[in-house]
Image: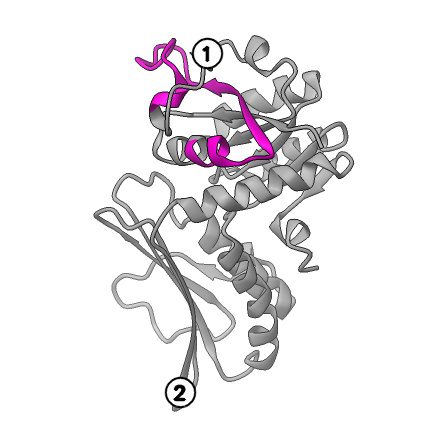
Amino acid sequence: MNQIKIAIAGCSGRMGRILLENVVLAGDMVLYAALEHNGSTMLGRDAGEFSAAPCGVKISADIEAALLGADVLIDFTRPEGTLHHLDVCRRLGVNMVIGTTGFSAQQKALLGAAAQDIGIVFAPNMSVGVNLVFKLLETATRVLSEGYDIEIIEAHHRHKVDAPSGTALGLGEVVARTLGRELSECAVYGREGVTGERDPSTIGFATVRGGDIVGDHTVLYAGTGERIEITHKASSRATFALGALRAARFLAINPAGMYDMQDVLDLK
């Protein structure tokens, strides 16, 4: 089997560097392109500086030229940047693994439209463990659908710009869907002052930001006399990178379409 030619967006960021390291170490992949935004001080440098050793791939802002001939672009950047990359990938026939969070409903629709022409794995969290939690929540929520208040608590590092996290929202969507509800109609994102008694039909969210927390997520089912908690704690971004590489391998052998990590891990 030929090596999968991987491009990485935002390659000098926290997640980008971990992705670079893992792609370089993967025997079935080769780093094909490394992208950064115009004006980045990293442009022109060897992307291998952020991994084990120089690799001959120069960091570039010329997206069209860099992606020509690539198999998969892995993108953990910002919604606006990802959508710009999406246009280029669709035009060039380059598949995408998207771990970017914070998309609006309209922006997600653009991803779906592009998936008519290219393969896209889009997931709020690429961790294998988190995606197993998504599956476990379906069972837990069915069993605990009555008599239990459901709250989602998440914690991330001080630099994270969106809240709640995409993963927390993904957890909420699984819970709401299992209950036959729309998350947009039952989510409560903050409480302050005299709020009155808790509405049992709601799903609450609590957000913590501080330090270098990689990502902690807990779904709490609080009943009378007991609490059930399903928790995932990430101690390294490597778990997200390894999941993204599994997604890239999945795209290499599947047709165009919109997929998530449940598809990649055969959990559906």
Measured as percent of width and height from the top left, residue 11 is found at 42, 25
Which residue is located at x 55 percent, y 82 percent? 146
Which picture quadrant has residue 199? Answer: bottom left
* Of residues 251 and 77, the one drawn nearer to the viewer in this rendering: 251
Residue 103 visible in the picture: yes
- Quadrant of the image containing the C terminus: bottom right
Helix, strand or loop at disc 1? loop
Q: Can residue 35 be found in the magenta stretch?
A: yes
Three-letter code, disc 2: Glu
Q: x, y (%) of residue 257?
A: 74, 37
Mark 1 and mark 2: Cα distance apart in space: 54 Å
**Residue bearing the label numbered 2:** 226
Q: Residue at label 1?
A: 61
Question: Residue shown at 55%/40% (left/top)?
Answer: 245
Task: Indicate whether residue 232 is drawn in magenta.
Answer: no
* Labels 1, 2: front one: 1
Q: Determine the residue positioned at 27% across, 61% down.
A: 192
Task: Tell me where the magenta segment starts and ends, as one range.
Answer: 21-49
Local packing at callout 1 (Cα closer than 10 Å; few below 14, some 14-19, many 20+) is many
Type of the residue with mark 1? Ala
